[in-house]
Image (cartoon, rainbow, N blue to C red):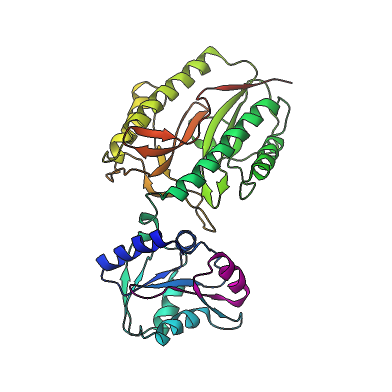
Amino acid sequence: MNAAALSRLRATMQQANVDVMIIDHGELLAWLTGYTVSETLYRACLVPLNGDPWMVLRQLDEAPCRAQSPALTVESYRDDEDPWFAVAHSMLRRGFQRARLGADYTSYGMTVHSWQQLSRHLPDVQWCDLNGVNDRLRSVKFPAELEALRQASAIADTTLDAMGKAVQGSWRVRDVAALAAGEFLRLGADTGETGPIVIASGDNGFLHASGHEQRLQRGDVLHVELIPKVKHYSARLMRPFIVGEISTQRAELALQLIAIQDEQFKAMKPGVSAREVDAIVREGLLRNGLRADYPNITGYALGLYTRTPRPSDFSCSFHAKAEWLLEEDMVFHMYTSAQSLAFSETVRVTPQGAERLTTLPRQLLSLPEH
C-alpha cells in the first residue's frame, strides 16, 4: 500500500464527506496498492476513511495480490460465486450498511451492470459520485513515479537511436516494429508494445494508422511512436525518419515544427492554463500555414497505464477550451504534426518550464535507401 497515495485519497474522501471509497479502476488500484488485475471478474479495493483498506477479488488472484501488496487485507471468492455479493458482503460485515459510499462513475470497472448489482446488495448505502477522481488523484507525480517515467524515457531514447542505426530502405514496417519491440524487452520495458510505426501521409491521420506489411521506399516518411512502460509507467516519443535524402522543404518544415513546440515547452510552468500552452502550437502552425486546420489536441497526461481500454489519458489534455492549470510534477506527452512529420516528447512541468524526460536531439532523421 502506497502511504502517500492513501493519504491523498483520504483527503479527497474527507472533503467529499465519504465514509468508504470503492476502487475498481485498474490504474488507481495499481497506484494505491501496487497490485492490479483485469476485470475478467469484478474486483475492488475498499478504502474506509478510518481503518485498514481491504481487497476483494477471485481466489485465483489472491496469491499474486498478497505477494505484490503484502500489507493489504485480502478476501477472495470462488469463480462460481457472485463477485458483487462478495464485495458488498465484505462491507456489510464491517458495519457499512448505511455508509456514504464513494465511487467514480467514470471508472471502467463501474459499469451500469456493476452498479446495479452492488446497489441490489447494498440497498441502504448512499452513493456519492466522485467524478474523475481516479485520474485527478494521480495527476501530480510522486518521486518514485517520476523515476519510472525517466527509466521508460531512457528506453524510448535508446530504442529510437538503435532504429536509426539499423533500419534501411526495403525493410518491411513490421521488421522495424519487431526491432523496436525487441529493444524494449531487452532494455527492461514491461512489454514489447511499440506504438504506431507506419509510413506517414497527411497532417495527423497517420498518428493512429497501421500498415505493417508495407516496405520502405525512397522518399517515404517512417513515423515512429514509442511508448515503453516501466512498472506500468509509460513514456512516449515520436520522430520522423526520411528514407534517402532529406529535401530542403522537409528540413525547413521540421525546423519550424520544432521551434514552435520548443516555445510551448518554455511556457509549461505551474499556474499556466492548458489553453495558453496549447495556443502556442495550435495558432503557431495555423498562422505559419503549416496546417489548414488543427482538430486534435497538442498534448495529454502521462503516467500509469495498466489493463484499461484507453491507450492515452485525456483527463488533462491541451486544446483550445482547456481551462485547467498546470501543476509542478505533472507529466505530459506533447506532440505536434504537419505534412507527414510528427515530433513529440515526454515532459515534466517545472517552475522553469518543461523538463524533457526524453532527451534525444530534436531533429529530422534519415535512413539509407539500401
Q: Is residue 155 magenta?
A: no
Where 8 sits versus 260, above or below?
below
Q: Position of residue 37 (x, y in %)?
A: 56, 65
Residue nearest the observer in this picture, 238 or 92? 92
Where 4 sits versus 251, above or below?
below
Q: Is residue 90 left or right of residue 271?
A: right
Whether residue 167 is visible to the viewer of this picture, yes or no, is no
Q: Position of residue 244 (x, y in %)?
A: 65, 18
Residue nearest the observer in this picture, 281 or 51? 51
Q: Position of residue 362 (x, y in %)?
A: 50, 25
Whether residue 155 is visible to the viewer of this picture, yes or no, is yes
The residue at the point 39 percent across, 59 percent down is: 4
Residue nearest the observer in this picture, 210 or 246? 246
Q: Which residues are magenta?
A: 49-73
| Residue most extreme to the top | 248
In this figure, what is the number of numbered marks?
0
The residue at the point 56 percent across, 64 percent down is: 68
Picture quarter with the C terminus: top right
Where 14 sits versus 333, above or below?
below
Residue nearest the observer in this picture, 160 or 299? 160
The residue at the point 53 percent across, 12 percent down is: 248
Q: Is residue 6 left or right of residue 233?
A: left
Where 227 sits versus 257, above or below?
below
The residue at the point 61 percent across, 72 percent down is: 63
Q: Position of residue 177 (x, y in %)?
A: 67, 38
Q: Is residue 166 left or right of residue 150?
A: right
Q: Is residue 66 left or right of residue 9?
A: right
